[in-house]
Amino acid sequence: MDKVPRLKMINAISGFKSASLVGTRDKNGHENLAIFNSIIHAGSNPPLLALLVRPLTVPRHTYSNIKETGWFTVNHIRREFYKRAHKTSGKYREDISEFEVCGLNSTYSTLCPAPYVEDAVIKIGLTFEEETKIEANGTILIIGAVKELTIPSASIEDDGFVNLETAGTLAISGLDSYHKTERLSREDFIKLPDDLSREDS
């Protein structure tokens, strides 16, 4: 199989992924915004998210800004601005703000020095905790600690579960296919009888 079709296939086979914009700012105040489909849950206590960054064979502004300032934001992409969000995947010069050229507005909190996306309704502010290099291909897994969280109250269910569908969060498959979601059901926690449970459960 040719290189490009193979890349598209491999990028899709892991399934639907989160569609997020990562906001950063360098020490001189230049804003950066980039789309990522590699945000994953890394732990609840303490609350951690992980971000996979491509190898540093070319300048990676998101990575360098996170290392400079120690902060970044994760902003869920919604239907209202996904086309503009997708434009941030372009390889812009370091001095160009993706917020400006892609038609998105930045906003700031009093705590987090990295920019949020104004139109996002789920916004997460994180600090850099650690990184791990994946030796197999040179990618870098960044671990961030959740320090700030904005979620619409209407999307928080009684047990704390966040209904991403009512928040309008989109999913992505591959690098360029965007999807709405449809909940089938929420299933009960599986509590096994003692004779089937592990000793540590």
Image: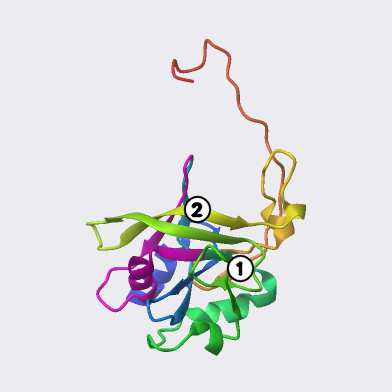
**Mark 1 falls on what kind of element?**
loop
Could you say which quadrant of the image residue 79 lies in? Answer: bottom right
Answer with mark 2 or mark 1, whichever residue precedes in sequence. Answer: 1
Could you say which quadrant of the image residue 100 lies in? Answer: bottom right
Q: What residue type is labelled 1?
A: Ile
Using the rendered image of the protein, determine whether residue 153 is visible from the camera's viewpoint: yes
The structure residue drawn at horizontal position 48% and vertical position 39%, both measured from the top left corner, is 45
> How is this picture coloured?
rainbow
Q: Give percent across and percent down for residue 29.
A: 43, 80
Residue beneath disc 1:
77
Q: In this view, does 107 lie above or below 163?
A: below
Q: Of discs 2 and 1, which sits in the foreground?
A: 2
Q: Which amino acid does label 2 sit on?
A: Val
Q: Give percent across and percent down for residue 128.
A: 38, 58
Q: What stretch is highlighted in magenta?
A: 45-73
Direction from residue 141 to residue 40 in the image, left or right:
right
Q: Distance between the residues labelled 2 and 1?
A: 18 Å
**Mark 2 falls on what kind of element?**
strand
The structure residue drawn at horizontal position 64% and vertical position 68%, both measured from the top left corner, is 120
Outermost right residue: 154
Residue beneath disc 2:
146
The structure residue drawn at horizontal position 67% and vertical position 42%, both measured from the top left corner, is 160
Q: Is residue 187 above or below residue 40?
A: above
Labels 2 and 1 touching (C-beta < 8 A): no
Direction from residue 65 to residue 160 in the image, left or right:
right
The structure residue drawn at horizontal position 28% and vertical position 78%, both measured from the top left corner, is 58
The quadrant in which the N terminus is found is: bottom left
Q: Is residue 161 above or below residue 177?
A: above
Q: Give percent across and percent down for residue 115.
A: 52, 72
Q: Give percent across and percent down for residue 177.
A: 56, 71
